[in-house]
Amino acid sequence: MTVPTSAAPPVSAAVSAGAPSGRAVRLSDLVGYHLRRASVFDLNGAVAALEPEGLRPVPMSVLQSIVEQPGISAAEVCRALGMQRANIVPVLADLDRRGFFLREADPADNRIQRLFPTRRGLEEAQRALARVAAHEARMLARLSPAERAELRRLLGLIWKTDSPDGADTPDG
């Protein structure tokens, strides 16, 4: 059996800037591997923390966006959270059914609905955020406050873009 000369070198032959000099790359050398492991760990904990409230992380994030930015539109929520528009429809339907927000037509454009939290929505968002914050505090207990801030800063550098509206920047 002959191997085509255009075939890529075997993965074990690759050397990474993250691997010790001259050593083949290992899974544990990949930042993405660690990001994924941390993400799964965090998501599982957030799901468990929100279960008593009957929420999941995405609906909680949508509700929190409405609370933090009263009058936001569904399209703006999607941009801020990196969601597809089709995916927000059932989330908003559930939050609406539970009485967590009200819709009002945009005075400048009746095609746009502005979303405003109700008192019930404000209370639910506060409870849910407190539960997730407690989970995060447990998850990050081994890090000092300065290390937590640095972790947020570094992660933000990975996913932020130069969006003109600032919606997908770490501080936006």
Image (cartoon, helix red, strand yellow):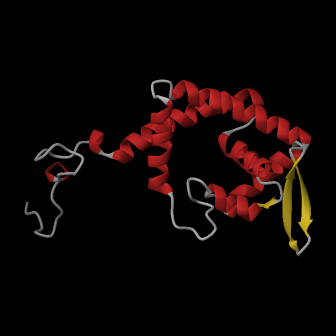
Q: Nearer the viewer, residue 117 or 96?
A: 117
Could you tell me residue 144's position as x and y percent? 47, 28
Figure disc tally: 0
Is residue 86 toward the left or the right of residue 159 in the image? right
Q: State whether residue 131 is above or below residue 72.
A: above
Q: What residue appears at the point 52 percent right and 67 percent down from the top-left corner? A: 162
Is residue 120 toward the left or the right of residue 151 in the image? right
Q: What residue appears at the point 73 percent right and 37 percent down from the top-left corner? A: 55
Could you tell me residue 62's position as x and y percent? 73, 49
- Farthest front residue? 146
Q: What residue appears at the point 24 percent right and 47 percent down from the top-left corner? A: 18
Could you tell me residue 86's position as x and y percent? 70, 62
Picture quadrant where residue 26 is located: top left
Q: Nearer the viewer, residue 69 or 7?
A: 69
Q: Quadrant of the N terminus?
A: bottom left
Q: Quadrant of the C terminus?
A: bottom right
Q: What residue appears at the point 16 percent right and 54 percent down from the top-left corner? A: 10
Is residue 23 toward the left or the right of residue 133 in the image? left
Could you tell me residue 135's position as x and y percent? 60, 28
- Farthest bottom residue? 109
Q: Nearer the viewer, residue 28 or 138?
A: 138
